[in-house]
Amino acid sequence: MSTKSLDPRRTPEQERSRKRVDALLAAAARLIAERGVDRVSMTDIATASDMSKAAVYRYFPNKAALVRALAVDAQIRDRAWLEQRLQAGGDPMTTLLRVFREYCGLMTEDPYRAQLRAAINADVELAELDHQEACEVARTVADYLGDAARESGAKLEMQILVALYLFDGMLALAERTPEERDMVVDTYLDMVRSLFV
């Protein structure tokens, strides 16, 4: 699949068009939370957003492009969320571990986020986009930790990147064993802590 196939057909410039795209994305997110990405069709999304299938295809050439738009939106929101949480002040390591715990909670308790992560990991181009974002987040967190971590520079960034990649495994296990979700999250956080201190 080429990157071009993941691009929207048109970028909405008028407010009415932006609202239609927002409605499409919101409908897609609801359906994905309920059924998972594979069980949602463009027809389902058109029906749920009260639009014709042709109207949906005017904005997105295929479901992959729509999922990419959802993934990019999630990255933007998550980055803003992270930066806001890191500005809270206090001991950097304590703050970072609290932020990791909060993020684990967000991801393990929201079926949409878990389904979207699975879709991102299953698509080569989305996975590459996600990798680039993970590298940026690793740099942001490494800069934030500064001298509070045992390591610094490239080594610290790699430790953070490893923690971010382990996150998807933790998420999959938490989804598979919901009765032990808290233990799974605690174990993951213990592993993250041991990387940095």
Image (tube, rainbow, N blue to C red):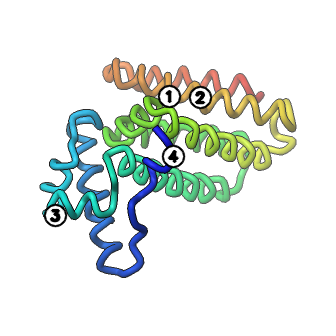
Q: Amino acid at mark 1?
A: Asp
Question: In 3D space, how far apart are the residues under numbered discs 2 and 3 (Cα atoms)?
Answer: 38 Å
Residue 152, horizontal then vertical, whole percent: 86, 36
Nearer to the camera, 172 or 60:
60
Question: In 3D space, how far apart are the residues under numbered discs 2 and 4 (Cα atoms)?
Answer: 23 Å
Indicate left or right for 106 with 86 as reference: left
Structural crowding at the residue carrying mark 4, measured as other residues with C-alpha within 10 Å and reported as few (<14), some (14–19) or many (≥20): few
Q: Mark 1 or mark 3, which is nearer to you? A: 3
Q: Residue 151's image quarter?
A: top right
Vertical side of 101 occupied by 72: above or below: below
Question: In 3D space, how far apart are the residues under numbered discs 1 and 2 (Cα atoms)?
Answer: 6 Å
Q: Which sits earlier in the primary sequence, circle 2 or circle 4?
A: 4
Q: Are marks 1 and 2 in contact (CB under 8 Å)?
A: yes
Question: In 3D space, how far apart are the residues under numbered discs 1 and 3 (Cα atoms)?
Answer: 34 Å
Q: Amino acid at mark 3?
A: Met
Q: Residue 112's image quarter?
A: top left
Q: Which sits earlier in the primary sequence, circle 2 or circle 3?
A: 3
> Mark number for residue 168?
1
Structural crowding at the residue carrying mark 3, measured as other residues with C-alpha within 10 Å and reported as few (<14), some (14–19) or many (≥20): some
* Residue corresponding to mark 2: 165
* Residue corresponding to mark 3: 51
Vertical side of 114 occupied by 58: above or below: below
* Residue corresponding to mark 4: 3
Question: Tag 2's secondary structure?
Answer: helix
Structural crowding at the residue carrying mark 2, measured as other residues with C-alpha within 10 Å and reported as few (<14), some (14–19) or many (≥20): few
Q: Amino acid at mark 2?
A: Tyr
Q: Which sits earlier in the primary sequence, circle 3 or circle 4?
A: 4
Q: Are marks 1 and 3 in contact (CB under 8 Å)?
A: no
Residue 84, horizontal then vertical, whole percent: 60, 59
